[in-house]
Image (cartoon, rainbow, N blue to C red):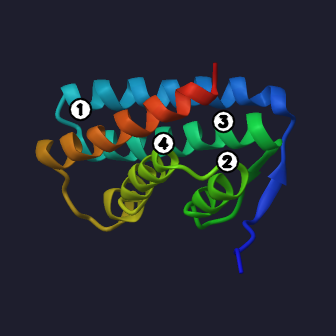
Amino acid sequence: MVKKSIRAAVDRSKFISYKIVAENFYNGAKIASEYNYYNAAGVLIVHAAIAFADAVTIKYNGTKSKGDDHREVITLLEEILPSNEERKKSINHLDAIIVHKNAVSYSGDVYNKKDIEQLWKHLERFKSWAITFLK
């Protein structure tokens, strides 16, 4: 049985705002990384990925995940988009980013350049996929 995600209805036109927010987080992460603020970059990478995912779910379903478990957006993407290899790979990239949310934000772990380079790879791949839905 497929687990239903916790959702909030959102006017589909709002996907544009979520995309802009995602781009702001993305650009902020880039700047933070350039100044070696790696934890700040990591937090912004996580939020950029989530905002891109929200933009996709809003555009295609008029809903977004809500609640404390950010992995719910993965369930929602799986429910509303056709299953294929590209979706699977992209969702794996998103998941690889989301698992860092607590560590980069709250654990006291110090992220370094190598950590952020890895998160960037995942974000770039997820963003490329998400943008194809947001044109």
Q: Report, in whole angstroms, how far the alpha carbon at label 1 lies from the one at label 3.
A: 24 Å
| Element at label 2 | loop
Vertical relation: 87 (above or below) 107:
above
| Element at label 4 | helix
Give the residue at x 48% y 52%: 91
User: Which residue in the protein does label 4 denote?
Assistant: 49
Which amino acid, by three-letter code, is at mark 4? Answer: Ala
Q: Residue furthest bottom?
A: 1
Q: Report, in whole angstroms, how far the alpha carbon at label 3 lies from the one at label 2.
A: 13 Å
| Mark 3 vs mark 2: in front | 2
Which amino acid, by three-letter code, is at mark 3? Answer: Ala
The picture places residue 13, in percent across and down from the top left corner, at: 82, 26
User: Which residue in the protein does label 2 denote?
Assistant: 81
The picture places residue 62, in percent across and down from the top left corner, at: 83, 41
Vertical relation: 106 (above or below) 30:
below
Q: Report, in whole angstroms, how far the alpha carbon at label 4 lies from the one at label 1.
A: 16 Å
* Quadrant occupied by the N terminus: bottom right
User: Badge 1, how many Cα within 10 Å: few under 14, some, many 20+?
Assistant: many
User: Which residue in the protein does label 3 denote?
Assistant: 55
Apparent side of residue 70 relative to residue 7 in the rendered image (left or right): left
Q: Report, in whole angstroms, how far the alpha carbon at label 3 lies from the one at label 4.
A: 10 Å
Which amino acid, by three-letter code, is at mark 1? Answer: Ser
Which amino acid, by three-letter code, is at mark 2? Answer: Leu
Give the residue at x 50% y 24%: 23
User: Which residue in the protein does label 1 denote?
Assistant: 33
Apparent side of residue 4 relative to residue 26 in the rendered image (left or right): right
Apparent side of residue 57 relative to residue 74 in the rendered image (left or right): right
Tell whether label 4 touches label 2 (CB within 8 Å).
Answer: no
